[in-house]
């Protein structure tokens, strides 16, 4: 018999905890990104059970200073959803043309500037 998440005795399944960090220190140091406004945006836009603003105790959003935001979820939570909300915030702030969201490791996302250094040189040579 295969192991199940819920036993026959009716015990609750083991608690799942997902921890995500969004590192926006580079644009924060350049003073073009406001991490506290982003943390507030996440608190209002993250959906729990199909409703926005329904975080309760299951999801916490913390501004760690230095431009880092931490999201801890005690339920099923997708990192792709966090990346989607980050892109949505960048679009709203009109920063999407300069910043991109990159996953540096599992559960860690970083905001980086687009590399546009070599593009102008190719046009001059032709």
Image (tube, rainbow, N blue to C red):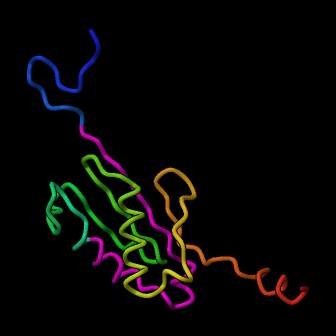
Which residue is most to the front? 126
Query: In the rendered view, would you say 75 is above or below 124?
Result: above
Residue 68 appears at what percent x and percent y? 45, 71
In the displayed structure, 91 sits above or below 20; it is below
Count of numbered labels shown in the rendering: 0
In this rendering, position of residue 23 left or right of residue 12: right
Instruction: Pick out the residue farthest to the left.
Output: 10
Horizontal and vertical percent for residue 6? Answer: 17, 25
Q: Nearer the viewer, residue 13 or 52?
A: 52
Q: Residue at x 42, y 72 (%)?
A: 87
Question: Considering only vertical position in the picture, is 91 above or below 12?
Answer: below
**Is residue 1 located in the magenta-colored stretch of the structure?**
no
The region drawn magenta spans: 15-42
Q: Residue 41 colored magenta?
A: yes
Picture coordinates of residue 17, whole percent (x, y)? 31, 46
Examine the image and state in which quarter residue 71 appears. Answer: bottom left
Residue found at x 37% / y 84%: 92
Residue 5 in picture, x, y percent from top left: 23, 26
- Taking 16 as reference, is 94 left or right? right
Residue nearer the viewer, 9 or 101:
101
Quarter holding the C terminus is bottom right
Is residue 62 positioned above or below 78 on the image?
Answer: below
The residue most toward the right is 125
Q: Is residue 115 left or right of residue 107?
A: right
Which quadrant is home to the N terminus? top left
Toward which corner of the image does residue 11 lie, by quadrant?
top left
Q: Residue drawn at (36%, 73%), measured in percent from left and top?
A: 63
- The residue at 79%/87% (across/down) is 120
Q: Nearer the viewer, residue 22 or 100?
A: 100
């Amino acid at each position: 018999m295969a192991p199940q998440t819920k036993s026959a005795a009716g015990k609750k399944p083991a608690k799942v905890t997902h921890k995500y960090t969004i590192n926006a220190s580079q644009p924060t140091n350049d003073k073009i990104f406001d991490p506290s406004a982003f943390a507030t945006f996440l608190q209002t836009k993250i959906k729990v059970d199909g409703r926005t603003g329904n975080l309760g105790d299951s999801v916490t959003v913390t501004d760690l200073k230095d431009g880092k935001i931490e999201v801890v979820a005690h339920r099923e939570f997708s990192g792709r959803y966090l990346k989607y909300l980050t892109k949505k915030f960048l679009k709203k702030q009109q920063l999407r043309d300069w910043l991109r969201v990159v996953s540096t490791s599992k559960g860690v996302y970083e905001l980086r500037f687009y590399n546009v250094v070599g593009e102008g040189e190719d046009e001059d040579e032709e």
